[in-house]
Image (tube, rainbow, N blue to C red):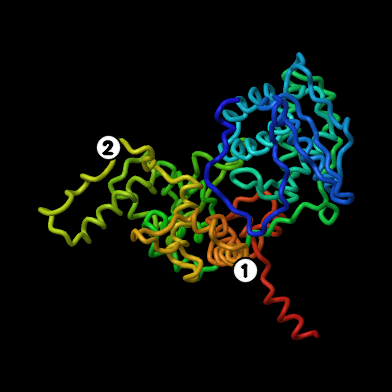
Amino acid sequence: MPRLFARSSTPRFNVSAPPKVPGYRQRSGYGQALVTLTDAVTRRRRDYWLGEHGTPESRERYHRLIARWEAGGRRLPESDWDAAPAEKQAGLTIDELILAYFTWAEAYYRPTESGTLKVALRLLRQMYGQSLAAEFGPQKLRLVRDEMIRGSAAETPVRQPWTRVYCNQQCRRIRAMFKWAASHEMLPVSVHQTLATVEPLKRGRTAAREGRKVAPASMELVDACRPHLSRQVNALIDLQLLTGARCGELVILRPIDIDTSRKDGVWLYRPARHKSEHFGKERVIYLGPKAQEVIRPFLEGRRLDAYLFSPREAEAERRAALTARRRTPASCGNTVGSNRKHRPARQPGEHYTSASYYVAILRACELAFQPPEHLRPRALPDGTAETKRAMLLRMTPKERAELDAFRKAHRWHPHQLRHNAGTNIRREFGLEAAQLVLGHSSAQITDAVYAERDTHRAVEVIRKIG
């Protein structure tokens, strides 16, 4: 399988230590793989032979066995629960189907959608990659879904348990792959039809955790981060608060996309790409006087097709500021730019992405809000500080939980600013105005997701009648 399913090397850590999972191993003196499971009730142990050690088939059989063991409350599965294939059977495997489907999906879907799809297909491939695609049925899909709910502490990075809504979304993506295969005559249509019988997880009727509703960002946190952000990122924050636009729409803003011809003084911005363009809908973002003042400094001397908010410009301004603050005379020490890499592996792009915009804010949060002294990296004898990985490894579970709670209380992300704008517009001008500004086709979405209800009116009514 190509590298498009390689996992990230960035480590993450669980706050609480999960129960250990028996490992995949080789029987001493044999070429066979096995795993030893313990019954949670009787404490009886049993060895399960998985096939030839090191083969993809034996590793997939290991993952399926662990999933069935966990799904059954860690009771021992029957000895004939799944027969190890003696040889690769003819026909389309799930590995081959995933490769064909993702090659198509990566070009068809937006990067955010294809990236989320990759996560679901990685788990499916891990458990059933060598199995025949025509034999993938509802029970196997439920077993994959159980793994989504359970998570895995044995993987690197740790795979956290997914929320109920996210599990349902990922199962729909898996079913969509089999529907695509049927439409391309790669599989019988009956495979997708049987998978469609699996009902989604319902609130209160599943062990899957519920996700937290996105709330408006605290303006105290936002203002504390501003000194640690470039003027480009600060401008993006101001525009989101003023217009309610998505961050993905603002990072690609260009002068050529702005219509300044209206007589009422309001500018219209039509993004070159937006979330609903494949439905044939037009997205218009209204820029009032305050938003225009934010944009004007970036319009001067810029080409019509150049992006307004450039990480490349932000990095150049940052380096210029460092040079201006330099105390060492120019004739001493390093000359400006002499200690830079000639061919760095990563270079700033022409415009921010939603991800790089979020990372800039995350780094500003880390600088603006330092955790307590005992939760910071320690100084080493050689004068350097220990790495974050080393710090997390030496921490106790209680300290990691405290650090995790501190970070959650002092973090925010750009999408919350859209909620800020929706809530403020609804409070002052009503639900319909918030719907129009945010660009929703239905006021129900605005009401349920983006615009927090103003409870002050209800309080005033109760005071008068209650």
- The amino acid pointed to by label 1 is Arg
Q: Residue at x 56, y 31 (%)?
A: 4
**Circle 2 sits on which residue?**
342
Q: Residue at x 76, y 13 (%)?
A: 90
Give the mark toward the camera: 2 or 1.
Answer: 2
Give how far across and how far down residue 157 sits, in percent: 59, 45
Give how far across and how far down residue 95 sits, in percent: 68, 24
Q: Residues within 10 Å of mark 2 (few under 14, many from 20)?
A: few
Identity of the residue furthest to the left in this view: 331
Task: Locate the N terminus by quadrant.
Answer: top right
Label at residue 427: 1
Q: Residue at x 38, y 40 (%)?
A: 346
Give how far across and how far down residue 329 sits, in percent: 13, 58
Spatial CA span between label 2 and label 1? 53 Å
Relative to 188, say whether 153 is above or below.
Answer: below
- Describe the element under mark 2 as helix, strand or loop: loop
